[in-house]
Amino acid sequence: MAKATKKQALGRGLSALLKETSADINSATDKNADKLVGSIVEIALNNIEVNPFQPRTYFDEEALTELANSIKELGVIQPITVRKLAGNQFQLVSGERRFRASKLIGNSTIPAYIRIANDQEMLEMALVENIQRKNLDPIEVALSYQRLIDEIQLTQEQLSVRVGKKRSTVTNYLRLLKLDPIIQTGMRDGFISMGHGRALISVDTNENQLNVYTKIVKDKLSVRQTEELVKSLKEGGASSKKKNQVPTFVKESISELNTFFGHKVVISANAKGKGKMTIPFSSEEDFNRIKKLLK
C-alpha cells in the first residue's frame, strides 16, 4: 500500500514539474532537465503533435479500434515516447497507434517517456524504431532505409549495423524502390509479395515489368512461377540480341549464299565476326549436289 502511495506522489510531483517548469526545459543542460527527461509523465494529448518522420502511412482501422478497446479496459500499458519541443509542446517519437487509439476513445492524457532530441536524432530514432516492427510493408521499410541513407548520411554498411540487418537484406529492400510506382503500390496493397518484387527487379524495362506484374495478379502466379517467367523473358531477349549482332558483311551475303546453295542457310556470328554457317540438305542426292558446289 505504501508503494502505491509513493508512486502516486511521484506522479503528482512530475506532473507539477511538467506544468511549472517544462516550458523552460529545452536541452539536457537546463535546470530540472534531469528530473523530467527520462521520466514517464501523463501528458495532455492536445500538447502532442504527430511525428513528421513517421514512416508508416497506413493504420488499419479495425486493429486501431481493437487497441482502443483494450486501452479503455486496461489503460496504456506501454508509454509512448515523445521529445520535448518549445513551451509545453511535445512530438511523438514512437507509439502513434497508442496515441491515435487514446484519442479515439476520448482520453485527454497519455503516459509518455520524455526525451530531448534534435531533428536528425528524432528522424533516426523514429525510423529505426519503426523498422523493427514486423507489420511495416516492404516499401515502407525500403523508404525508411533510403531516408536514413539520404538524411542521416549513412552508408549501406553503417545502416545495416544501425538496424541490425545483414547488408544484403538492406540492399534487397532498397532495390525495390527501382520498381515502377504502380508495382510498388501493388506490393503495399498486398497484391504481390516482396519475393515477386525481387523477381521483377531484373526485368529490363518498366513496360515489361508492368506486363509481368499484370500477369502475376491476373493468374495468381507464385514467386517461383514469376521467377520462371522472368527467366524465360530474359532468355528470349538474349536470343533476339544475338540475332541482331550479326555483322553487316554476313547480312549482305545471306541472300547470295541462299541462292548459291538452293537452301536457306543459317548463320550465327558475334559482333567480332566469329561464327558458324549451317547448310541444310533434304536427301543424299541433295547432299552430293552441295558437296560438288564446295569443291
Image: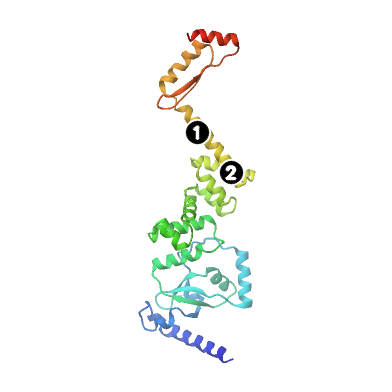
> Which residue is denoted by mark 2 in the rendering?
226
- Nearer to the camera, 179 or 266: 266
Q: Quadrant of residue 133?
A: bottom right
Count of marks, rendered view: 2
- Amino acid type at mark 1: Ala
Q: Is the image coloured rainbow, by chain, by secondary structure, or in one colour?
A: rainbow
The percent position of residue 97, horizontal first and vertical second, equals: 55, 68
| Residue in view at x 50 percent, y 87 percent | 10
Which residue is denoted by mark 1 in the rendering?
Answer: 238
Q: Residue at x 47, y 70 (%)?
A: 92
Instruction: Identify which residue, 130 or 266, lies in the foreground.
Output: 266
Question: What's the residue at 47%, 85% (across, down)?
Answer: 14
Instruction: Indicate the position of residue 246 as horizontal and vertical percent values.
Output: 44, 25
Instruction: Please tell me how crowded label 1 is: few (under 14), some (14-19), or many (20+) other residues with Cα within 10 Å.
Output: few
Label 2: state its secondary structure.
helix
As drawn, which residue projects farthest toward the left?
29
What amino acid type should be assigned to the residue bearing mark 2?
Thr
Left or right, residue 99 beside residue 21: right
- Which one is earlier in the sequence, the residue at label 2 or at label 1? 2
Classify residue 95 as left or right of residue 89. right
